[in-house]
Image: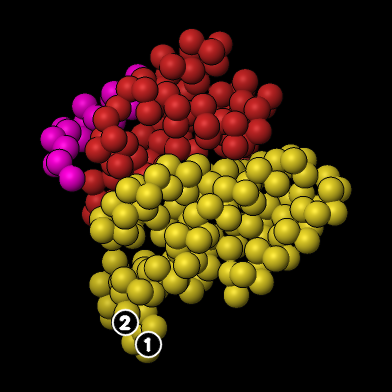
Chain colours: A red, B yellow
Amino acid sequence: MAEVNTHSGSFARRIREALRAGLAEGGIEARVETQKVRTTRLHRVIVSAPQFEQLRPSERQDLAWRIIDQRFSPDEQLLISMILTLTPDELEGG
Amino acid sequence: MADRRFDDAQYLRRSKKNKYANGAMYLGGLVLDILLKAKLLEEHPWLQNPPGDLARRPASERRLHALCYREHDLIGILDRLSRRTLDRLDSAGLLKTLKKLCGTWTIHVRYSPRTSEISEAADFLNRVREVREWLK
């Protein structure tokens, strides 16, 4: 597998921007946060949006990963460990 | 063990009753939990006979032990699987499916108070069946 040369900070920013823009195209105003997984090169992503209320958790996952699929190379996608897709209420109560 | 939990989940799914959907999804997630923990044990054989005094071990080993024996943190386990395992899963076209399943289950059990529908549980279990064969 080819080595991915991503500067961690800019990679995280690209993830946030891609998800915000991609979801906005579908009318979803999302807040996106990224976290680096300690001792690894992986990033975790937390996306919250009130509009997720209308979607099943599996539909939210499909949507978020489809956006990532369109905007990141397969090797870059390997560096995203997970995307949590929550409503603000779920995030508050979690 | 994973097969039994999967059969339990399928039994609930076959009821076609929405009131059993959350239970079916919970059990489906446990199937992944068991199989991912088996992968951890395979990759870190010391976990099969962990040292008595874990407090003296490095934080990374204590974390692995907790993931294996005390928690149901699917995403935490995924983060610690070897690159080789992840590459093999990816080559089989199943890594993204597994990540989505882990994300869905985590939302389901940790964050969302909603009651699932049985069709959602059926879809979830179909995807679990796909990755289960590979993880075995």
Identify residue type, mark 1.
Asn
Q: Is residue B66 found left or right of B127 in the rendered image?
A: left
Residue B8, above or below B25? below
Q: Secondary structure at mark 1?
A: loop
Residue matched to label 2: B46
Circles 2 and 1 in contact, beta carbons < 8 Å: yes
Tell me if residue A6 is in the magenta stretch: yes
Q: Secondary structure at mark 2?
A: helix
The image position of residue A74, as x and y in percent, is: 29, 35
User: Same subunit under labels 2 and 1?
Assistant: yes
Residue B55 seen by the camera: no
The image position of residue B118, as x and y in percent, is: 77, 44
Which quadrant of the rendered structure holds the N terminus of chain B? Answer: bottom right
Q: CA distance from mark 2 to mark 1?
A: 6 Å
Residue A52 seen by the camera: yes
Image point (73%, 59%), residue name: B10
Residue matched to label 1: B49
Residue A74, above or below B118? above
Closer to us: A68 or A35? A68
Closer to us: B77 or A67? A67
Image point (70%, 66%), residue name: B7
Q: Is residue A56 found left or right of B47 in the rendered image?
A: right
Image point (47%, 67%), residue name: B136
Q: Which residues are magenta?
A: A1-17
Residue B36, above or below A5? below
Image point (40%, 68%), residue name: B39
Identify residue type, mark 2.
Trp
> Looking at the rendering, which quadrant does residue B59 occupy?
bottom left
Q: Is residue B118 found left or right of B125 in the rendered image?
A: right
